[in-house]
Image: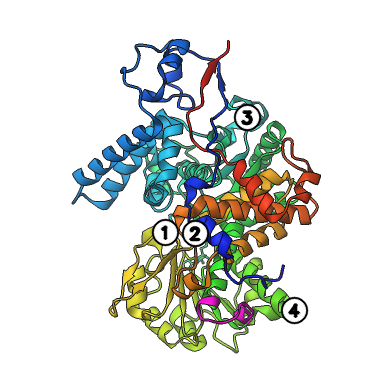
Amino acid sequence: MMWKNIAGLSKAAAAARTHGSRRCFSTAIPGPCIVHKRGADILHDPWFNKDTGFPLTERDRLGIRGLLPPRVMTCVQQCDRFIESFRSLENNTKGEPENVVALAKWRMLNRLHDRNETLYYRVLIDNIKDFAPIIYTPTVGLVCQNYSGLYRRPRGMYFSAKDKGEMMSMIYNWPAPQVDMIVITDGSRILGLGDLGVQGIGIPIGKLDMYVAAAGINPQRVLPIMLDVGTNNEKLLQNDLYLGVRQPRLEGEEYLEIIDEFMEAAFTRWPKAVVQFEDFQAKWAFGTLERYRKKFCMFNDDVQGTAGVALAGLLGTVRAQGRPISDFVNQKIVVVGAGSAGLGVTKMAVQAVARMAGISESEATKNFYLIDKDGLVTTERTKLDPGAVLFAKNPAEIREGASIVEVVKKVRPHVLLGLSGVGGIFNEEVLKAMRESDSCKPAIFAMSNPTLNAECTAADAFKHAGGNIVFASGSPFENVELENGKVGHVNQANNMYLFPGIGLGTLLSGARIVTDGMLQAASECLASYMTDEEVQKGILYPSINNIRHITAEVGAAVLRAAVTDDIAEGHGDVGPKDLSHMSKEDTVNYITRNMWFPVYSPLVHEK
Ligand SMILES: NC(=O)C1=CN([C@@H]2O[C@H](COP(=O)(O)OP(=O)(O)OC[C@H]3O[C@@H](n4cnc5c(N)ncnc54)[C@H](O)[C@@H]3O)[C@@H](O)[C@H]2O)C=CC1
Ligand SMILES: CC(=O)C(=O)O
Ligand SMILES: [Mg+2]
């Protein structure tokens, strides 16, 4: 597809999605679940525990009668009880420092996660807008920074250099027979917080929570992985409580041997799993993507997921200006940050321009300006990153190393997009310079995470760049009240809108690799999700409350692209022919039917 069909959501689809997440899955009576334990062991297993939710007959059958208070509560009553406690926590911590409150909330959710997974995910799904900022960005960043102190119970698997030669057997230590989604990090670039070593495990855990909440991946089939190859963070190396391997990071072949061995082990045990690479420093993000993308079913979320989300937002800004999508080819875009995310975004956006305009990628770079820590990237740059070569400007146009404000003043861009990890770098001067943009609705995307690393706040963007901008940030901000009484809408430009659908669509297609076509389809689907009315108000992305619906749509688009690319091998009883005969609507229904939803299944004990 050539980005021609982006004319907003059909009426039927718009109506369907307003039903919200709870309508998107089957509520049929759940089938029984076989357990091999009885008695108190069941209560201590978060996969099976129902707390006060065990019916009396089940208490008899499982030998837990008398081990619980007599009252039997429904899952809904248990959710209400949890939310009441959560609101009490909020009230009781009013006035406390923000970080203290955020961690207290995370601990409360984490305790539930450790105790009763079904209830945890039910609470998460029903309150995703309130809880995503805790289990995901921004609080997950704080959790990673403090993980060695916060650690109580293991979650996920850890592989280190000490495990070399052992991984093929270690992988069988994971208790679940089937794994569908793996998220792996080496902790080397956690959000915009740098190298956090083993403490980065919080990111795969948070991403997989989003997989369960948004994509309905069964939580018994997800696996967070920490590849502990050391850390170069001196503070952590000096910290007695640090839980990781206390050595500098492995490099070169030594590093690759570890990750190669892990990939072989994981795909030997679970050949149909999908692996998401997350928060690797740029060199390994690109290096591993090139190394594995044709061999294993994997993608890099920071490079590819972010690119798709950003591109959908960029196309939205064209629509917000009241222009046809084809006008994207004329948008001048300044990207600040030339790492794994910034380069991924620039590349995908340039490819879209090339396709739309029918020109070469090199010609399509004309309106793109890339800035890194040394300023504007030009061909004059010594030690030019190979990934940035295509985007390097001619220094005759603007000088090598020009600052952000210099570039903005000279170029008058339609879009200023930050993926630098540097908080506040879009300062007052930069934002005021955006008032002179050639666009009637300039766009400012401060995509770095967590909140303190955002290139600017929403309030500052609307204050200094003007009330007519469209604004998006990687972590959530509140909408801004403008002086004219109108609302400055804040969008969350975060890869969470795509990675769950990319993973789920890939899994259900049975594809053995993730192609560019599948990623492009995901981005196009997100771009076309919003109505013209919404986009014109500056709302570029859906509400997170609709995350299950958007994920079903994205998943279907990914699956259909896999069929088009002739790589869909089918999943379970659904073969490649069945997939290829599905209409678009059938595909969305198929995806939706396969989403797990947290309900208590009757437990049947088997020895
Ligand atoms: N909203 C979203 O969905 C996503 C947001 N991100 C965020 O993007 C940020 C960067 O991630 P990566 O690209 O993976 O990091 P990276 O470390 O690979 O790249 C950072 C880039 O920023 C540049 N930079 C550093 N200081 C700068 C300065 N003062 N001025 C201009 N450029 C500067 C560096 O030269 C480098 O090119 C992180 O904060 C991350 O949280 C990343 C992925 C997804
Ligand atoms: C959102 C995300 O993946 C990041 O900030 O790295
Ligand atoms: Mg990331």
- Across and down, in percent, residue 371 comes to 52, 74
Q: Mark 1 vs ligand 1: CB under 8 Å?
A: yes
**C-alpha gap between disc 3 and disc 4:** 48 Å
Q: Mark 2 vs ligand 1: CB under 8 Å?
A: yes
Q: Which residues are magenta?
A: 319-329
**3 or 2: mark nearer the eye:** 2
Q: Residues within 10 Å of mark 2 (few under 14, many from 20)?
A: many
Determine which of the numbered discs, if any, sits on residue 171 in the image: 3
Task: Evaluate whether residue 148 shows in this view.
Answer: yes
- Residue at image position (46%, 23%) is 45
Residue that mark 4 sits on: 358
Query: What amino acid is labelled 1 in the image?
Result: Ser
Q: Secondary structure at mark 4?
A: loop
**Of 583 and 394, which appears nearest the observer?**
583
Q: Taking 77 as reference, is 513 above or below it? A: below
**Of 39 and 377, which appears nearest the observer?**
39
- Across and down, in percent, residue 121 comes to 45, 38
Q: Secondary structure at mark 2?
A: loop
Query: What amino acid is labelled 3 in the image?
Result: Ile
Report whether 569 appears left or right of 82.
Answer: right
**C-alpha gap between disc 1 and disc 3:** 34 Å
From the image, give the main secondary structure of the stretch colored magenta: helix
Residue that mark 2 sits on: 494
Residue that mark 1 sits on: 475
Chain-order first, disc 3 or disc 4: 3
Q: Are marks 1 and 2 in contact (CB under 8 Å)?
A: yes
On the rendered image, what quadrant is the C terminus found in? top right
